[in-house]
């Protein structure tokens, strides 16, 4: 019943994305990080590799390769760079995901083909300055008028939402009150250039410095009625579903990052000679490496199982939260030890491991903090 | 037009290789494999010729056990049209490879063959030359540029030879080999990988080809290369110059 074998396609995919990442992403990663530069040419190259739309059916320009294949691809990109992986993971899970799963046929026809080739990117705007973990506290509103929706409010930390490739942002907004008095949420599609909508790139990040993060402002921003995603009132449910899938890709980023940091540490420990022998010959270092490898193996098994559940249409919310939580904590452990093994050099920017150490931190915060994952998991446990 | 290309499964050249204690080979546990990088260049060249027009069919052939199918499929994922897998569990040397390829050549009748100049695992650099010999066709090895004639019946090939470049013309059928600078092979994209799933790979048991598969080369022993000695630090430039002159004898 249990099989741990990847399909030949998945094996080829891993190899090919690894070579692409080593050849096209890694050489510029340090420089882009230093300059806080978002590289649209790289997005297009990643698009040509097929890194966008992997779970999308062919009729909308996707490759229908399945969720695990997508996770493997994110893992391989994250193995060399967190920012590029963020662009891919957010581009798929948050950008393409909601439109593909909840959009009308027209919306899919309109946006997906370009999103699936990397010629365009979409953002998913949920977080607000005063509503992060507490997404239900969001205040951005969209009120119906004769011609459609009038949006007011703001969003913060929205990935892929303010760059020349951004073609649309899915915005979560309060669209009224439900019968039980609770707020009614809907997701509304807003294109850049719409009057009253401003997207501003955020700078000064510790991590993911070459990924695109935006603040969004809506000031009587009017969009047509058909810009609603799916049905009115389904926004909260759509958001929860999107985040469940998103957690798997955050898990993949963490796993890939941990793998990359581990490989760097392993290699360095074999090459760095102190006291007349490679430092890996000291049991303390060897055992660190053994622990890192073991944690990574466990993380991979948990994440792949969650993907398997999803691919087989079984409930996967609990496992997705566990995988996100566990993989990002494993990455924290591995990145910390990897820097330790590098000694002083591990603190220098020219060593990739330094960037991994910084990039790791986001994974315990974005798409639901580790604290929130524990809340989600404990709710699944019925406590 | 039909172009026959090769795809050999080799140990990943970026991995650290360990020789078995008894010298009978390398430790294959946990080893990664990939398409011989020179074969990738050959496949890329065939694909570029195909994409220039003229409707060429690119057929990729691999020799090896079941596992070798993955490297053939990688060629298909890059864009080759069809695969041939000569199933052969035992180890083969360049001569056996050349004979097997000659048989494949006879049934496929390609316009020309393009292979990697050598495989990065055993570095023999002989299979293509032996194949050309067995077939009695011209060879153009170590190509850094391949230009097909207008009628696609011959090619002008720039070869990397000691001390420079040599340009020759070969009439087809012929055997070409790819050198490092011929092109930069593409990465197999995900859409390419998905398309490859539907492409056909014919399996041919080596026994059915009537080739004597006994290797001509006798394998004696494998040993690790000697570990490099640590360098020395010199006090100043004059000492360096003196050492380069007298010890290293390079100036
Ligand atoms: C680079 C980056 C990219 C992002 N991309 C996107 C995006 O594309 N789209 C989007 O919508 N959002 C995005 N986010 C936002 C991200 O999801 C939020 O930052 C995250 O959900 C946490 O919200 P917060 O920052 O407001 O922290 P807060 O919610 O204020 O949390 C602060 C601390 O309090 C803890 N805490 C809060 N509530 C509880 C509780 N009930 N019990 C215990 N502890 C609690 C948290 O765990 C955390 O430690 C991004 C963020 C960053 C930094």
Image (tube, coloured by chain):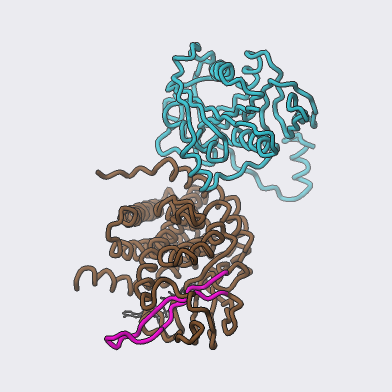
Corner quadrant of residue B184: top right
How far across and down, in percent of the image, does residue A121 sit? 55, 65
Q: The chain drawn cyan is chain what?
A: B
Corner quadrant of residue B167: top right
Q: Is residue A347 left or right of residue A303?
A: right
The one nearer the camera, B136 or A101, is A101
Q: Which residues lie in the magenta part?
A: A167-191
The one nearer the camera, B200 or A37, is B200
Query: Compared with residue A247, is residue B199 higher up or lower down, i.e. above or below?
Result: above
Q: How many marks?
A: 0
Image quarter hosting the N terminus of chain A: top left
Q: Is residue A329 left or right of residue A380?
A: right
Query: Compared with residue B60, is residue B94 higher up or lower down, i.e. above or below?
Result: above
**Which image quadrant shows ligand 1?**
bottom left
How far across and down, in percent of the image, does residue B157 sit? 76, 29
Image quarter hosting the C terminus of chain A: bottom left
């Amino acid at each position: 019943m249990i099989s741990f074998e990847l399909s030949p396609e998945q094996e080829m995919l891993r190899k090919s994305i690894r070579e692409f990442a080593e050849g096209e992403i890694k050489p510029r990663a340090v420089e882009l990080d230093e300059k806080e530069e978002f590289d649209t040419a790289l997005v297009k190259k990643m698009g040509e590799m097929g890194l966008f739309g992997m779970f999308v059916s062919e009729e909308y320009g996707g490759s229908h390769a399945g969720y695990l294949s997508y996770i493997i691809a994110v893992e391989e990109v994250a193995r060399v760079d967190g920012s590029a992986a963020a662009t891919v993971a957010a581009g798929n899970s948050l950008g393409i995901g909601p439109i593909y799963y909840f959009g009308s046929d027209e919306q899919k026809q309109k946006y997906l083909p370009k999103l699936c080739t990397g010629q365009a990117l979409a953002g998913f705007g949920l977080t607000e300055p005063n509503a992060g973990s507490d997404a239900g506290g969001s205040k951005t509103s969209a009120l119906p008028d004769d011609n459609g929706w009038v949006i007011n409010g703001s969003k913060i930390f929205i990935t892929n939402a303010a760059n020349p490739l951004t073609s649309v942002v899915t915005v979560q907004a309060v669209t009224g009150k439900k019968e039980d008095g609770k707020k009614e949420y809907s997701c509304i599609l807003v294109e850049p250039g719409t009057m009253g909508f401003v997207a501003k790139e955020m700078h000064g990040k510790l991590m993911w410095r070459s990924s695109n993060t935006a603040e969004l402002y809506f000031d009587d921003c009017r969009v047509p009625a058909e810009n609603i995603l799916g049905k009115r009132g389904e926004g909260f449910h759509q958001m929860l579903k999107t985040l469940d899938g998103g957690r798997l890709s955050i898990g993949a980023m963490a796993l890939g990052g941990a793998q990359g940091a581990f490989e760097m540490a392993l290699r360095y420990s074999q090459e760095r000679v102190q006291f007349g022998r490679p430092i890996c010959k000291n049991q303390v270092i060897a055992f660190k490496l053994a622990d890192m490898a073991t944690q990574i193996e466990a993380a991979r098994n948990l994440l792949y199982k969650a993907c398997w559940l999803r691919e087989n249409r079984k409930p996967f919310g609990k496992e997705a939260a566990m995988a996100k939580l566990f993989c990002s904590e494993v990455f924290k452990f591995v990145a910390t030890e990897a820097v330790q093994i590098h000694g002083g050099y591990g603190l220098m920017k020219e060593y990739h491991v330094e960037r991994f150490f910084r990039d790791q931190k986001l994974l315990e915060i974005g798409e639901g903090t580790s604290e929130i994952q524990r809340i989600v998991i404990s709710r699944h446990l019925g406590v | 037009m039909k172009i026959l290309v090769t795809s050999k499964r080799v140990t990943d050249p970026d991995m650290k290789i360990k020789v078995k204690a008894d010298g009978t080979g390398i430790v294959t546990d946990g080893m990664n494999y990939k398409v011989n990088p020179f074969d990738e260049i050959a496949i890329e060249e065939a694909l570029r010729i195909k994409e220039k027009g003229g409707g060429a069919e690119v057929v990729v052939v691999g020799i090896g056990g079941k596992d070798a199918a993955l490297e053939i499929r990688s060629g298909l994922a890059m864009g080759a049209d069809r695969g041939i897998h000569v199933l052969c569990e035992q180890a083969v040397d360049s001569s056996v490879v050349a004979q097997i390829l000659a048989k494949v050549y006879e049934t496929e009748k390609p316009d020309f063959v393009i292979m990697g100049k050598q495989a990065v695992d055993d570095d023999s650099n002989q299979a293509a030359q032996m194949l050309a010999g067995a077939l009695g066709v011209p060879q153009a090895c170590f190509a850094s540029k391949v230009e097909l004639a207008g009628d696609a019946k011959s090619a002008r090939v720039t070869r990397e030879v000691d001390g420079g470049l040599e340009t020759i013309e070969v009439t087809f059928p012929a055997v070409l080999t790819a050198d490092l600078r011929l092109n930069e092979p593409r990465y197999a994209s995900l859409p390419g990988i998905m398309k490859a799933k539907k492409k056909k790979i014919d399996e041919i048991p080596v026994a059915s080809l009537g080739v004597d598969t006994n290797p001509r080369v006798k394998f004696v022993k494998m040993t690790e290369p000697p570990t490099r000695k640590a360098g020395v630090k010199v006090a100043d430039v004059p000492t360096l110059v003196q050492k380069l002159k007298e010890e290293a004898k390079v100036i």
